[in-house]
Amino acid sequence: MYFSEQDPDSVDTLDFRHHNYKEMRKLMKSVTDECPDITHVYTIGKSYMGLKLYVMVISDNPSKHELGEPEFRYVAGMHGNEVLGRELVLNLMQYLCKEYKKGNQRVVRLVTETRIHLLPSMNPDGYEEAYEKGSELAGWAQGRYSFEGIDMNHNFPDLNNIMWDAQEDVAPETRAVINWMQDIPFVLSANLHGGELVVTYPYDGTRGWVPRENTPTADNAFFRWLSTVYASTNLVMANPNRRMCHYEDFQSHNNIINGGAWHTVPGMNDFSYLHTNCFEVTVELSCDKFPHASELPTEWENNRESLLVYMEQVGLGIKGVVRDKLTKKGIADAIIKVEDHDHDIRSAADGDYWRLLNPGDYKVVVWAEGYFPSMRWCRVGMEPRPTICDFTLTQTPIQRLKEIRAKGGKIPQDLQSEESW
């Protein structure tokens, strides 16, 4: 069980109901009006039917990335009929705004130390279809797919793809999310679904498409930790007397499972891990895909602590800035390699990086094109905050020579021997 700060006496007065597209926009505007200094709303694209994919950022400087500050995201509504995630994300927007204004120190710390991105509806077309039917009438697949009939979680490249190329059958919603994931240096994410009670972690796809085969990543221990953090603080998942949703006894696995050992389909989690620096899990929030509106306050109580404590995991591991020794400027796209972890990450545009890791001592090597590599040991402690591991790289003589020539400068004496080559 993961223990964290919690106010058991708090009673949240939030807008507990199902929100269609127009109502969702209205609610998001009301939050930005109430907390203009810590919120910013933007769109990442449009659905097939032209509905905008809105994202709310909550941070002390929401409009831009701050050097060293990690970027976090929650994505909901990938399947339009799995609506609880959408409402929980909308609840979370309201909660963070209200609690920040109250001076709740836990929330203030989250908002000032993290840039939080909240996408409540990745599939607004599908949601509108399910919403018209309501919680009693929506079928198991009614509204699940995009307007084009695409299951967006199966619309991402699988782990065997070395590169991803644009394809005609990629939904516009999927393209928008992929571009978003690549444009912002996200560190941690969760994809909120419904229809079960379990947290799944990568890989979701298996090598050779073997069905139900445990397929761990190089960061399997950390992914299991992330999954356990959410599952153990979720009031329903953590209840030993709860009933199974269907036929899978996930309690025997502590309510977490490797995605490949359950559904052998590569999805957004795998893409996030393999093609970006971001670690992501999938949270199946409830047995009912479309719970009645009267159940939403209880579902918020069931998930509030989980949503908060999961975000706090973005501070685990190491972080730092990779800089040029001579200019002191950040180096973009530097490779950060942790020994014995076959998963490298890259620095962001300003040279900052974040590497999620469990407590321990790590040998870290950093290099970039035109620079000599640099190595140092970094210790990750038990405290829920990152260890600062900055790196300074020295340009190779050939790289220095190229840059001086490009600027038309005078060749220094120590490089004149290189020039003769």
Image (cartoon, rainbow, N blue to C red):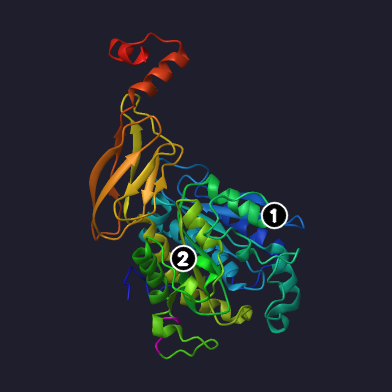
Above or below 272: residue 398: above
- In x, y percent, where is residue 296? 57, 77
Q: Quadrant of the N terminus?
A: bottom left
Magenta stretch: give its range: 236-240
- Observer-nearest of 275 and 391: 275
- Label number found at residue 172: 1
Res 34 seen here:
yes
Asked whether, in this view, residue 46 is left or right of residue 204, the answer is: right
Residue underneath mark 2: 202
Give the answer, above or below, for where 72 lies relative to 10: above
Q: Is residue 363 left or right of residue 208?
A: left
Q: Secondary structure at mark 2?
A: loop
Task: Specify the amino acid type for callout 2.
Answer: Pro
User: Is residue 238 within the magenta segment?
Assistant: yes
Q: Is residue 154 left or right of residue 100?
A: right
- What amino acid type should be assigned to the residue bearing mark 1? Pro
